[in-house]
Image (cartoon, helix red, strand yellow):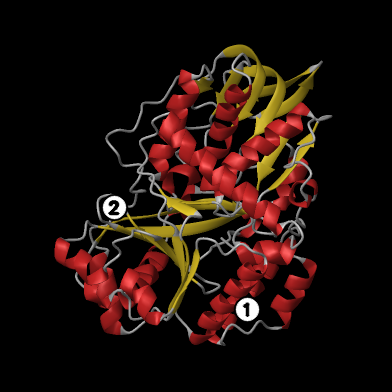
Amino acid sequence: MAPVAMRLAAQSLSDAQPVPFWLEDPGKPGALPALTGTETCDLLVVGGGYSGLWTALLAKERDPARDVVLIEGREVGWAASGRNGGFCAASLTHGFGNGLARWPGELPKLEELGERNLDGIEEAVARYGLDCDFERTGEIDVATEPYQVDELHEVYEEIERLGLADGIELLDRDAVRAEVDSPTFLGGLWDRRGVAMLNPAKLAWGLKRACLDLGVRVFENTPGLELVQAGASMGVRTPYGKVLARRVALGTNVFPSLVKRVRAYTVPVYDYALMTEPLSAEQLASVGWKNRQGLGDSANQFHYFRITADHRILWGGYDAIYPFGGKVSAEMDHRPETYLKLAEHFFRCFPQLEGLRFSHAWGGAIDTCSRFSAFFGTAYQGRVAYAAGFTGLGVGATRFGGDVMLDLLAGERTERTELEMVRRKPLPFPPEPIAWAGIGITKWAMAKADENGGRRNLWLKAMDRVGLGFDS
């Protein structure tokens, strides 16, 4: 980083508050009491992020008489669900390319199910009055290097070949800059309907209220500590009591699963983001962005960015930090060297915004798995179901995961449970120190590929062949 660029980036961060912008909202609901004593229910949902909230809501929609309890270790939406970028995507496969590589025969079905799932989220936002700034603006994948332009053309050709190009538009340099103006943009692929932008914390809080209105009993500051069989039921021990349930759905994601054999399939990745102060009318005019799409660049080490309801720009991604041993720790939630790097990248993308300052800077852990998209399963003779590994794409895909868990707990064969994506798991990550070394080599190789026209070296090609990857 050049000294002048570093100085300007540092100055832009001088007032940034080290807290997630979304969670610093005066409308944040108060915490509900913790569970004490013994509770019994038909379905216990563990986890008060999107995965658990959607599962509880869908369970009550399927059977209003079902007695549902949800427990959350801290407060609903406090973790990844409340601090993410607010990209709510139809894709269930972490993008078209990853889906094509892993499930080519199922991809049209997966795309259809993903579109229906996003429609279902939009319908729920309207039905329950979820005040979460939901805007179905779509997303543009932007090319910032010539080889990425070629890759976007290849992706579009594959989309056309499969008959999935409705609503997808290939943009040349002038067309993409007419949408959002950056001198770094060389082209783009606009998915007009497949992504919505929203306020992630407000979505979580709205889902909490909707669950309560349907009769879900929600207990906050109530971590699930241990899962055991209790006769015909399952028991989950909590700090001040326990829950006995006929069925259990685990939506704990990045946190250690209560089914211990599941833990090897995910690792935590720390992702970081910045939020600007609101843009003035002149600053907005210099950028354009009238259609308010989400954006992401096409590099391996990619940035994601979007504009908020109050005309701020969220700018995140690039670094994906894996802590040795896979420990989730609050100490990792902030990384000034990454904030500085992100700020410098921001002003390289939008030099016309020089002088704009960042109001918030934050980070946190998300769960990733080796195939970059969710996996599913059951335990204890089908009485416990889990979904995990959403790899940064959980805002939308967790609702689909909730449906899958409920199908599995009911023992039903559905179009969801018949998917290879649901029936098979990704490769587990190896134990330490192999995981640390392998992830480190993979990150280095991905950075080198970005520098070398996208060319993947022998290490990445080998990882591709065996189906192992690392992403955020």
Q: Crowding near pointer 1: few (<14 within 10 Å), some, many (20+)? A: some
Q: Residue at x 62, y 28 (%)?
A: 45
Q: Residue at x 26, y 77 (%)?
A: 351
Residue beneath disc 1:
445
Residue 443 position, x and y percent, is 60, 72
Give 314 or 75, whichever is nearer the viewer.
314
Q: Residue at x 38, y 60 (%)?
A: 293
Disc 2 marks a residue whose amino acid type is Gln
Q: As drawn, is 296 to the left or to the right of 223?
A: left
Location of residue 330 with respect to 281 vertically, above or below: above
Q: Quadrant of the N terminus?
A: bottom left
| SS at mark 2 in the image | loop
CA distance for labels 1 and 2: 33 Å
Kindly indicate whether the residue at mark 2 contacts the one at mark 1 (C-beta within 8 angstroms): no
Q: Crowding near pointer 2: few (<14 within 10 Å), some, many (20+)? A: some
Residue 171 position, x and y percent, is 44, 75
* Residue 320 visible to the viewer: yes
Residue beneath disc 2:
17
Give whichever of discs 1 and 2 has the lower sequence position: 2
Give 9 or 332, whichever is nearer the viewer.
9
Residue 111 position, x and y percent, is 63, 54
Disc 1 marks a residue whose amino acid type is Ala
Mark sitting on residue 112 = none
